[in-house]
Image (cartoon, grey):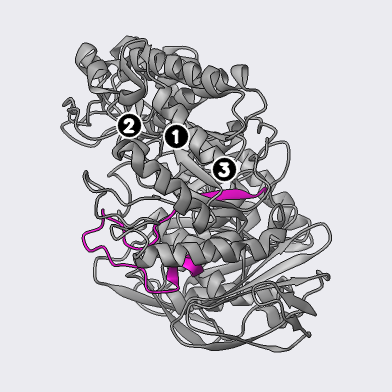
């Protein structure tokens, strides 16, 4: 898929603001809101995300007068809008006239209206109504000076990532016919000679609803692909309308960080600006670590271009079992973390805290106490402070390490119950590997698995692949080229197992990666629940859990670590295979935190990438690079004060002080420093 050229958000500063739901409030409150937004430094709000019933009260009867007044009021106060197409949820009248719009669950039961996203993504009835509303919105506001960005739908796939209704079934069959051409091609791809599943017609195929036993994993993987594509098709249909009516206005939809249900590589390719909704848990003192991985994905989806944090919580959310508030300073730190990782702003859900509905306990910039609320004081202070770092806008993040995220492998390694173990979780492995790199002081980009016209690996020294369950020959060739050109590749367990049709590669794992990695997997050896094992690396033992493998090693490869417990005692566990100017490493076991830090530290050293000698998960250092100057962010995610050293002669943008190279900088608990400097030749003290 070709990535669309990007149109930037129409703002002349870092974006600051949040979701606004004026239709939940009487009109006299709007005036107060506009005044307080201006006082808080707000320059962008998202609206009217869930206002379809207010805009179109009956079919084809539109009431834009109230929305006109809101937008005009905001614009009078210097505030632009991220204008939603309001298609996130259909109105009750539409559902009752066309109940076939409602989605079905995996058991074939129709879900009832009463929440949000009450639609089947494949429904032509829903699509036709949504597109009429989108066009009406576009025509109405095409020339309004407040329009900065189009916001299509809302959090695709959040509540209904897949639908198993008859309409989706018909769409699935059309998708399969397009993919395979004829039924013989599908039978070959799906291996339907197993368990007597041979099909004579596409008409005989249904979505993989609840069945009497394990379902064909090839069908399950294709249904995951289809489900993502169905929502992408819906997204694209609204994009087409907006591009026709307002060709110069950028479009987006808000992503949900590292989200299994949708292949965000495909979604990002068709929009102008990547936006994300991020809600790290304040109850988890290390929640910033997976957040950094999420942000690495967001900035990488469009080749390092700036993105936008469109939603975060000023304090507590309303949907966890226990909704812990953010301690003073934590919201500021979370906002700076996103900006450090390439976001050109910090937005929130939402502006004014609701008095009713499922989100009335969700925090807001303006809490229930109004101007007296702590969240308002903190968000107003941040709005003023962000003006000091506006120079970072448009700059890009510097990284020497990348992590491969492949949705086919994520889906395939978790979409069926016929795996060697259900305990080797793709997301947990990705987070564990990234966490070790974070502790070692690395900023990590995210890349596709390769195999396209342009290699995604060229600008990196180290590429890590926690899992690549599904692998193609083209991907193997791209990874081989990276290694032969001098790169260091690290591949994790249960990789190179199947091709894109879920067939085991000839000769077994790691399939087309065999020569590159210098190993053959004879047998997977998952650990029973509660069991642990160990490997010996450089004279030290490191614990493993969940997974191990019986592997045979090629003569060309070097055994770096061996198993030291159980049946595999003495056998190879980690292997290094030199190829060209680089090397590929294979980790056959699921290592715990200290083991991953030890292995990846060794590999960073081999690649001559500066790293921390003492792993630290509370200090984060990220550099954004602009045309004339760079910006290094120091983020203290702990509650205690720490000392860091300036990596270059710089100016601290937050306090205005000149900082000589190597000078000590005191970071209080949850503290931040943003240093602007001319040189890109940073000293290792920046770690």
Judged left or right of residue 170, residue 6 is right
Compared with 286, 271 (above or below) is above
Residue 249, percent across and down? 63, 30
Does the rendering let one see residue 337?
no
Q: Residue at x 74, y 50 (%)?
A: 481
Residue 71, percent across and down? 49, 34
Judged left or right of residue 480, residue 101 is left
Does the rendering let one see residue 458?
yes
Contact check, label 1 and label 3, Cβ < 8 Å: no
Q: Toward which corner of the image does residue 132 lie, by quadrant?
A: top left
Q: Residue at x 42, y 72 (%)?
A: 286
Q: Look at mark 1 in the image and give the residue it sits on.
A: 70
Element at label 1: helix
Element at label 2: loop
User: For the stretch drawn in magenta, what is the main secondary structure?
Assistant: loop
Q: Quadrant of the N terminus?
A: top right
- Magenta stretch: includes residue 436: no
Q: Look at mark 2 in the image and give the residue it sits on.
A: 162
Residue 318, percent across and down? 26, 55
Q: Earlier in the sequence, mark 2 or mark 1?
A: 1
- Nearer to the camera, 5 or 172: 5
């Amino acid at each position: 898929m070709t990535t669309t050229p990007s149109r930037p958000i129409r703002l002349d500063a870092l974006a600051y603001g949040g979701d606004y739901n004026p239709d939940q409030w009487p009109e006299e409150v709007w005036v107060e809101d506009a005044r307080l937004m201006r006082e808080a430094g707000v320059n962008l709000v998202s609206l009217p995300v869930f206002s379809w019933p207010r805009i179109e009260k009956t079919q084809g009867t539109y009431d834009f007068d109230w929305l006109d007044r809101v937008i005009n009021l905001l614009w009078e106060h210097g505030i632009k809008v991220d204008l939603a197409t309001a298609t996130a949820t259909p109105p009750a009248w539409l559902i009752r006239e066309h109940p076939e719009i409602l989605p079905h669950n995996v058991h074939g039961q129709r879900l009832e209206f009463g929440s949000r996203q009450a639609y089947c993504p494949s429904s032509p009835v829903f699509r036709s109504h949504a597109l009429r509303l989108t066009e009406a919105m576009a025509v109405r506001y095409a020339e309004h000076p407040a329009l900065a960005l189009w916001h299509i739908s809302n959090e695709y796939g959040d509540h209904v990532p897949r639908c198993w209704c008859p309409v989706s079934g018909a769409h699935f069959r059309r998708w399969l016919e397009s993919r395979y051409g004829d039924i013989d091609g599908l039978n070959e791809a799906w291996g339907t000679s197993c368990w007597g599943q041979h099909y004579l017609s596409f008409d005989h195929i249904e979505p993989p609803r609840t069945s009497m036993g394990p379902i064909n994993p090839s069908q399950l993987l294709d249904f995951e692909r289809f489900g993502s594509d169905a929502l992408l098709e819906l997204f694209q249909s609204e994009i087409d309308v907006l591009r026709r009516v307002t060709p110069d206005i950028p479009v987006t939809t808000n992503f949900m960080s590292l989200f299994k249900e949708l292949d965000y590589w495909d979604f990002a390719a068709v929009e102008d600006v990547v936006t994300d909704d991020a809600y790290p848990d304040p109850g988890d003192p290390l929640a910033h670590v997976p957040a950094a991985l999420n942000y690495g994905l967001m900035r990488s989806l469009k080749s390092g271009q700036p993105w936008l944090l469109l939603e975060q919580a000023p304090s507590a959310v309303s949907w966890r079992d226990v909704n812990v508030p953010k301690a003073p300073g934590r919201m500021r730190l979370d906002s700076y973390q996103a900006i450090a990782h390439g976001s050109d702003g910090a937005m929130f859900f939402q502006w004014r805290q609701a008095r009713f509905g499922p989100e009335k306990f969700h925090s807001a910039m303006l809490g229930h106490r109004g101007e007296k609320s702590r969240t308002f004081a903190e968000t107003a202070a941040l709005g003023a402070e962000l003006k000091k770092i506006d120079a970072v806008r448009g700059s890009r993040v510097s990284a020497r390490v990348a992590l491969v995220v492949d949705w086919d492998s994520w889906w395939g390694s978790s979409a069926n119950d016929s795996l060697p173990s259900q305990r080797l979780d793709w997301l947990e492995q990705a987070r564990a590997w990234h966490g070790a790199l974070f502790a070692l002081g690395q900023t990590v980009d995210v890349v596709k698995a390769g195999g396209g016209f342009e290699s995604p690996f060229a600008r990196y020294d180290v590429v890590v692949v926690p899992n690549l369950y599904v692998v193609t020959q083209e991907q193997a060739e791209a990874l081989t080229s990276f290694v032969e050109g001098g790169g260091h590749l690290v591949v994790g367990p249960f990789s190179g197992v199947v091709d894109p049709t879920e067939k085991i590669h000839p000769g077994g794992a790691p399939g087309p990666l065999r020569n590159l990695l210098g190993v053959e997997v004879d047998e997977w050896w998952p650990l029973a629940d509660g069991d642990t094992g160990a490997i010996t690396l450089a004279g030290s033992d490191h614990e493993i859990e969940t997974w191990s493998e019986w592997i045979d090693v090629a003569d060309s490869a070097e055994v770096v670590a061996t198993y030291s417990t159980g049946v595999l005692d003495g056998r190879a566990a980690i292997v290094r295979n030199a190829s060209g100017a680089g090397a590929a490493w294979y980790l056959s076991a699921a290592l715990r935190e200290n083991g991953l830090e030890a292995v990846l530290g060794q590999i960073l050293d081999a690649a001559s990438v500066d790293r921390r000698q003492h792993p630290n998960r509370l200090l984060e250092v990220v550099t954004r690079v602009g045309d004339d100057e760079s910006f290094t962010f120091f983020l203290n995610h702990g509650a205690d004060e720490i000392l860091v050293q300036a990596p270059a002669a710089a100016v601290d943008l937050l306090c205005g002080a000149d900082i000589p190279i190597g000078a000590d900088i005191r970071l209080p608990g949850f503290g931040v420093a943003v240093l602007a400097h001319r040189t890109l030749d940073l000293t290792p003290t920046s770690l």
